[in-house]
């Protein structure tokens, strides 16, 4: 943990409000999570039209996956409009729900689909329709290329100015998907596109698995954090450029315990934000505080002098890649103590919900369980799932 100061939705979520953060153009959204709001939405909406809208968010309209020619392997330099063809089990709808939704929200998705006439589509992305920008350094490192998967806030897939020389020097491949900006669905589009980009590059080039990183700018940076949190078995770090969120809430729910343990022990987070980007400097501080609360200690933060809300220049990228490569081995004693504290708090809250249910206070138990699910996410399962079944949550 280092600090230099110049001083992780469609598929299930229903968007209910949007606003623009002061000082930047990142569109944020709030989503319905608690079952009580879920039920109210059902009462307000005509059942048929509600289901139709939900299925559109879920991306369940089926179509055949056509055969796609491989993107050229072995090229170097900058390539635009690259078409990929390989799918990954990790980008499947089921895996996205499992890793990126809280357990109770995942159950609600399943129940909604069970009462509909269609099934969840295996892959939410049709690669034949997608285009990627790829930059490949001419000289691969002996241990294999590094890989930087970049999620932009803009619609075009482009390499930021000045980054090519740094990628060349550090032996890192860059890949970014078109039409994956802030206006695109997060769970249906931005996240699976990033996962498929990483998978296809790894299929075509010799990539060092210890140097596979997520990155993003502004709203894309927040999605990059969600993916690093949910897929620590793929990404060893995340470069968060002028955008971050706390983890352990509705925006970035915690994944199942085995994945979160890996995130705590093996993921390196690098925050780089302009010194004059006050909104995102504050967001970075809140994100780092949540990392400490959730026993994540391997992070680095830097404020770029004189910069506002702008994508990192070559020097910022160089520093980020340097810091991402400097993963710190965990202090196991400190980590164990912190995990014990979390488990004790979670156990007490689960016991409180059970006591409310035993006393006949079903509504109180339901409200508390909603809060537990939002805060602890996958860490609360299977206890939260078992309690939800007893309460009869929908």
Image: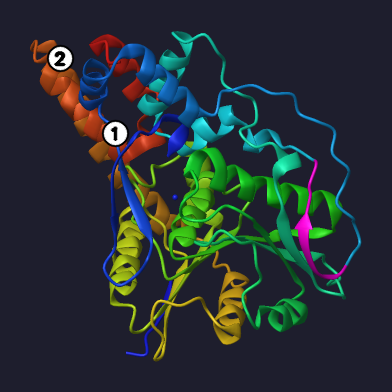
Q: Nearer the viewer, residue 240 or 13?
A: 13
Query: In this image, 125 relative to 368: left or right?
Result: right
Residue 138 % position (x, y): 87, 75
Q: Nearer the viewer, residue 129 or 223?
A: 129
Residue 234 % position (x, y): 64, 49
The reply to whether the C-beta atoms of the residues labelled 1 and 2 are less than 8 Å apart is no
Magenta-span inclusion, residue 316: no
Q: Nearer the viewer, residue 249 or 31?
A: 31
Quarter occupied by the N terminus: bottom left
Q: How many marks?
A: 2
Rendered residue at 70%/46% (across/down)? 130
Mark 1 residue element: loop
Cα–Cα gap, marks 1 and 2: 24 Å
Quarter occupied by the C terminus: top left
Residue 155 % position (x, y): 56, 58
Query: With respect to residue 229, does 64 lie above or below?
Result: above
Residue 357 badge: 2
Query: With respect to residue 182, does 112 lie above or below?
Result: above
* Magenta portion: prevailing SS class: strand
Rendered residue at 63%/80% (across/down)? 161
Specify start and end residues of the magenta stretch as a single range: 76-85
Query: In this image, 9 relative to 320: left or right?
Result: left
Mark 2 residue element: helix
**Residue 251: in sight, yes or no?**
yes
Please give the residue where the numbered disc 1 appears in the rendered image: 32
Residue 291: quadrant of the picture: bottom left
Residue 336 % position (x, y): 40, 50
């Amino acid at each position: 943990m280092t600090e230099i100061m110049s001083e992780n939705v469609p598929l299930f979520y229903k968007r209910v409000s949007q606003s623009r953060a002061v000082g930047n153009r990142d569109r944020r959204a709030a989503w319905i999570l608690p079952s009580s709001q879920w039920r109210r939405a059902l009462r307000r909406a005509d059942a048929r039209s509600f289901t139709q809208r939900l299925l559109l968010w879920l991306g369940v309209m089926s179509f055949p996956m056509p055969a796609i020619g491989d993107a050229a392997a072995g090229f170097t330099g900058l390539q635009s409009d690259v078409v990929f063809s390989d799918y990954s089990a990790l980008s499947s709808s089921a895996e996205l729900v499992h890793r990126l939704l809280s357990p109770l929200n995942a159950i609600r998705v399943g129940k909604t689909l069970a009462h509909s006439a269609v099934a969840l589509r295996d892959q939410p992305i049709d690669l034949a329709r997608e285009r990627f920008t790829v930059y490949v350094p001419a000289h691969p490192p002996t241990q294999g290329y590094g890989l930087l998967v970049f999620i932009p806030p803009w619609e075009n897939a482009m390499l930021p100015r000045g980054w090519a020389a740094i990628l060349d020097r550090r032996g890192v491949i860059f890949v970014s998907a078109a039409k994956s900006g802030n206006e695109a669905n997060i769970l249906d589009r931005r996240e699976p596109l990033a996962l498929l980009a990483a998978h296809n590059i790894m299929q075509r080039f010799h990539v060092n698995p210890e140097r596979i990183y997520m990155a993003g700018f502004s709203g894309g940076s927040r999605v990059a954090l969600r993916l690093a949190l949910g897929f620590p078995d793929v990404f060893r770090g995340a470069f968060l450029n002028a955008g971050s969120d706390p983890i352990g809430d509705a925006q970035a729910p915690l994944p199942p315990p085995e994945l979160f343990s890996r995130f705590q022990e093996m993921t390196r987070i690098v925050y780089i934000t302009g010194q004059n980007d006050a909104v995102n400097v504050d967001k970075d501080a809140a994100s780092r505080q949540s990392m400490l609360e959730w026993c994540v200690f391997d992070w680095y933060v830097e404020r770029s002098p004189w910069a506002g809300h702008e994508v990192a220049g070559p020097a910022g990228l160089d520093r980020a890649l340097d810091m991402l490569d400097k993963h710190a081995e965990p202090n196991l004693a400190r980590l164990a103590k912190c995990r014990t504290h979390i488990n004790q708090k979670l156990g007490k809250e689960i016991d409180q919900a059970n006591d409310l249910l035993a006393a006949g206070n079903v509504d109180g138990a339901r409200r508390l369980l909603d809060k537990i699910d939002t805060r602890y996410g996958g860490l609360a399962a299977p206890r939260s799932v078992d309690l939800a079944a007893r309460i009869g949550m929908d």
